[in-house]
Image (cartoon, rainbow, N blue to C red):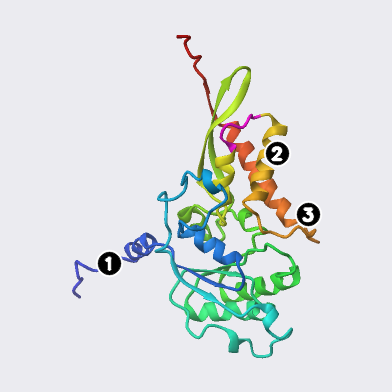
Amino acid sequence: MRTDSKQVSASERETSRREEPLALIFIYSGEFAERVIRNLINDPSFCKSCDLSCDSCKYGVYSHVRNVRAAVELPSPSDLPAFIDFPEKYMPKNIPHADLCVASGLHKDLLLELPSLLKKAGVKGLIVPIEDFADVPSGLAKQVEEKCRELGLEVAFPKPFCSLKPSASTPTISRFITELNVGRPSLEISTVKTGGRELIDSAIVRRSAPCGSTWYVARKLIGTETRTDTLYDVVAKAHHTYPCTATMAVDPETKEPILHIGGYVIREEVEKALKTAKVGRQEKRKKV
């Protein structure tokens, strides 16, 4: 029996697949998914939070436009019947090859139909960000999760999206976080001591919230005193002002507004970065 010397082993094929960029599709309704897409592709007309003081902190730093294979907008739930007997009527007819789907703002019956459609298309995982519990109640999330498990799909319901962390049990979803550097934020901070105060000298975004808000928070941190009350105030204002679009209604599961949870996430990450911050000392200016 001849053995072709050019035959590619299974491990080599797997390595080759891993080197390919993660392929994403978005199936959505509403504005939130569009914000995430525009942040991922680093649309230069997207972030206007700094207005005239914009220093283009994020533009040219990254672009994941190659990863986004399709963005399919479905009808708004408000334009559809309360109950849909034949959801396939409203679903995409063709889904391009992709590794992962992000679904946001969908009618509940369309979201329930989605896992079967993704499985047929060869998609490996599904992320359903929850920015408003009314869009994805806990009972619906449980049904979708059970369906995904039955079909062998990875699934995550981050509440809010900026709470998403890597997990060994969801390798494809973890690639979304580690390769695109989005999910639960991560920062690198340096400080300087001057006049008896410690100020934040620089804030580097290592991983951003999917909506891009971490870049704005990092920009506002520069020059901020590290005293807890001052720090908390700056982080909270920046997080709200960006703005965070998560609901202010109290979530029945967490007993907190989801917007507040997002605020706690970025605050915790700023505090974590400060614990390992490099501390410098500002040189005194010589009198001329």
User: Which one is earlier in the sequence, the residue at label 2 or at label 1?
Assistant: 1
What whole-number distance in Å separates the C-alpha atoms at marks 3 and 2?
19 Å
Q: Which residue is mark 2?
A: 233
Q: Is residue 222 above or below residue 121?
A: above
| Residue extent of the magenta highlight | 221-226
Q: Amino acid at mark 3?
A: Glu
Q: Amino acid at mark 1?
A: Val
Q: Nearer the viewer, mark 1 or mark 3?
A: 3
Q: Tell me residue 248's x, y (percent).
A: 76, 57
Residue at 60%, 32% (x, y): give it. 275
User: Which one is earlier in the sequence, the residue at label 3 or at label 2?
Assistant: 2
Q: Is residue 250 rendered magenta in the image? A: no
Q: Say which of 6 and 214 sits in front.
A: 214
Q: Is residue 265 above or below residue 232?
A: below
Quadrant hosting residue 44: bottom left
Quadrant hosting residue 157: bottom right
Q: Is residue 222 rendered magenta in the image? A: yes
